[in-house]
Image (cartoon, helix red, strand yellow):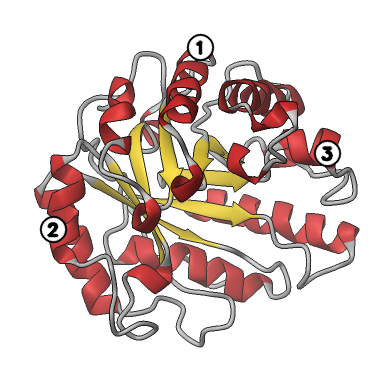
């Protein structure tokens, strides 16, 4: 049985009011985002970190609305690594009107561990949570994995009714078309009530150069459409994550942003900060909040 969660008040709507028609919790994931890998900010893991406190000001000046920061790894003993530095990053970001959203990849091997690693950053000031739902190796039995995923999400939603929670999901083009064996029978509709926003990992750069899916606009458009179709919710809040940044061209970015706008996305981001180029954030300016 999971312990009772600490009460949590809704975070302020940093960076402006929610976009028209978007619930306040979902609005936390609106705007331009940047993703920070744990190896890029944690001195415990890397003494030459590339994301420091000063970088919070840098991304704020570049028009970033949300910093998505990885807070631990499945193979680390800490539920939240480098707590004091994390708190400093949150404080600096909030002072600049930038939201901070934590992210973690649950393994589905231990429900209690997944739960605490997902919620703990909220206790230290994070404005929301992103579940990185892609691991299929720690719990290989599909039915067990799905059951744990659905139940953990439902428990968290019940205990944290006011906390913004998003799901970073495998791109449906991959699971529906390219590789049907990756995660068959993904429980889209059972999860629908547990998440406020859906963030497909829209990495067109991972596709074969000769594939039609290497086209950023086409890939983004199809992934947005399929997320909503799989959920059975044409109004589902979507924020596609593009990338991988060091392989993204200006033409890619233009297609990505255009398709996200056409698909009614509430925000866009590129994975990740360490490999992003300075021109990329201004290219996402149509989504700035």
Q: Which quarter of the image is occupied by the N terminus?
A: bottom right
Image height check: is 103 above or below 162?
below
Assign a secondary structure to mark 1. Answer: helix
Q: Which residue lies furthest to the left in this view?
A: 95
Image depth: mark 3 or mark 1 in front: 3
Q: Which percent across, then down, holds residue 178?
A: 83, 39
Query: What residue did someone put label 3 on?
Result: 178
Q: Which of marks 1 and 2 is nearer the N terminus?
A: 2
Q: Which percent across, then down, holds residue 169?
A: 64, 45
Q: Which disc, if any, is residue 30?
A: none
Within 10 Å of the Cα at label 3, are there few (<14), some (14-19), or many (20+) other Cα atoms? few
Residue at (70% x, 62% y) in the render: 135
Q: In which quarter of the image is residue 115?
A: bottom right
Query: What residue did someone put label 2 on?
Result: 92
Image height check: is 19 above or below 213?
above
Within 10 Å of the Cα at label 1, are there few (<14), some (14-19), or many (20+) other Cα atoms? few
Q: Which percent across, then down, holds residue 123?
A: 33, 65
Assign a secondary structure to mark 2. Answer: helix
Q: Earlier in the sequence, mark 3 or mark 2?
A: 2
Residue at (45% x, 49% y) in the render: 246
Residue at (20% x, 36% y) in the render: 63
Give me the C-alpha separation between circle 1 and circle 2. Answer: 34 Å
Query: What residue did someone put label 1 on?
Result: 262
Q: Quadrant of residue 164?
A: top left
Q: In this view, does 99 lie to the left or right of 81?
A: left
């Amino acid at each position: 049985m999971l312990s009772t969660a600490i009460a949590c008040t809704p975070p302020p709507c940093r960076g402006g009011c929610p976009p028209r028609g978007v619930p306040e919790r979902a609005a936390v994931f609106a705007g331009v985002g940047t993703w920070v890998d744990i190896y890029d900010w944690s001195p415990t893991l890397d003494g030459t970190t590339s994301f420091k406190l000063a970088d919070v000001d840098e991304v704020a000046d570049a028009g970033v609305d949300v910093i998505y920061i990885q807070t631990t790894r499945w193979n680390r003993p800490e539920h939240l690594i480098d707590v004091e530095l994390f708190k400093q990053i949150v404080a600096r970001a909030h002072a600049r009107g930038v939201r901070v959203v934590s992210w973690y990849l649950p393994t589905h091997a231990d429900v209690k561990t997944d739960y605490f690693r997902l919620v703990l950053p909220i206790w230290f000031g994070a404005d929301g949570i992103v579940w990185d739902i892609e691991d299929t190796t720690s719990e290989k039995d599909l039915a067990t994995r799905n059951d744990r995923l659905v139940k953990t999400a439902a428990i968290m939603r019940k205990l944290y009714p006011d906390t913004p929670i998003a799901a970073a999901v495998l791109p449906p083009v991959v699971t529906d078309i390219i590789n049907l064996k990756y995660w068959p029978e993904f429980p889209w509709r059972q999860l629908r009530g547990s998440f406020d926003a859906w963030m497909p990992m829209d990495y067109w750069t991972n596709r074969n150069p000769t594939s039609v899916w290497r086209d950023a606009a086409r890939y983004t458009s199809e992934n947005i459409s399929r997320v909503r179709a799989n959920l059975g919710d044409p109004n589902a809040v979507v924020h596609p994550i593009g990338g991988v940044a060091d392989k993204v061209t200006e033409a890619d970015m233009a297609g990505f942003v255009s398709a996200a706008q056409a698909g009614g996305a509430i925000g866009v981001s590129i994975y990740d900060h360490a490999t992003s180029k300075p021109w990329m954030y201004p290219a996402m300016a149509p989504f700035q909040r």
